[in-house]
Image (cartoon, helix red, strand yellow):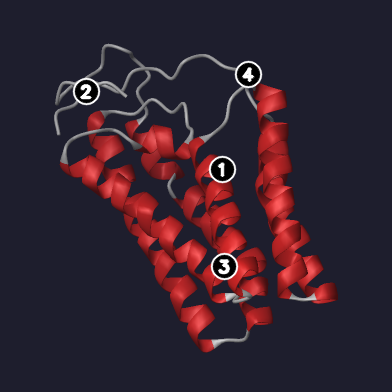
Amino acid sequence: MTDLEPNASPAPTQARAKQNPALKLALETGPLVLFFIANAKYGIFPATGVLMVSVVVALAASWVLTRHIPVMPLVTTLAVLFFGGLTFVFQDELFLKLKPTIVNGIFGTVLLVGLFFNKPLLPVVLDTVLQLTETGWRILTLRWGLFFYLLAGLNELVWRTQTTDFWVTFKVFGTMPITIVFALAQMPLILKYELKDPDQKDHW
């Protein structure tokens, strides 16, 4: 992403095929649901293999449907393959449990460091085509950056204090609903700072 002037609005995202929101949600949650089912039936190590295969299939499906690969699913897929591979090599589920902490920590750090340098990285991380004023981007980026740190902290708390089965369940029925609720809670902010006029400007 090219540098922006301090009081310039983020450039519109390049036009691309739009993905159905329900399909996008299915591609993002499908691997986790399969992971949960496989863990319940066969245990954590076979479930890890299922997760590794399913995230690759989901990413490939996203590319076929939109000719576009979002940043978060790409990073998540690479992290699952890396930490899943370590899980198999060392036969230690700890590597897989650390993946959400590290990935969410990276996303949170990228957003907050970008915010410090006045770089609007949130549209890239969330793969969004929202058009907001600079103030809107700043507030939303701060919130999402802190939220990613919250997810990292929750993951640490759960895997360190609960069983593996509970941790797997939390990933599917805890993390995803919490994220959806948080995203919906940002709608008033988005509506307030939505940039309807391309020439509208707002100083940070």
- Circle 1 crowding by C-alpha within 10 Å: few under 14, some 14–19, many from 20: many
Mark positioned earlier in the residue sequence (4 or 2): 2
Judge depth for marks 3 and 4 and give the one in front. Answer: 3
Q: Which residue is mark 1?
A: 73
Instruction: Kindly indicate whether the residue at mark 1 contacts the one at mark 2 (C-beta within 8 angstroms).
Output: no
Q: CA distance from mark 3 to mark 4?
A: 33 Å
Mark positioned earlier in the residue sequence (3 or 4): 4
Indicate the quadrant where residue 121 lies.
top left
Q: Which residue is mark 3?
A: 96
Judge depth for marks 1 and 4 and give the one in front. Answer: 1
Q: Is residue 159 above or below residue 103?
A: below
Q: Residue at x 77, y 68 (%)?
A: 46
- Circle 4 crowding by C-alpha within 10 Å: few under 14, some 14–19, many from 20: few
Q: Residue furthest front?
A: 89
- Circle 3 crowding by C-alpha within 10 Å: few under 14, some 14–19, many from 20: many
Q: CA distance from mark 2 to mark 3?
A: 36 Å
Judge depth for marks 4 and 2 and give the one in front. Answer: 2
Q: Which mark is residue 3?
A: 2
Amino acid type, callout 4: Ala
Secondary structure state at the residue bearing disc 3: helix
Q: Residue at x 72, y 25 (%)?
A: 64
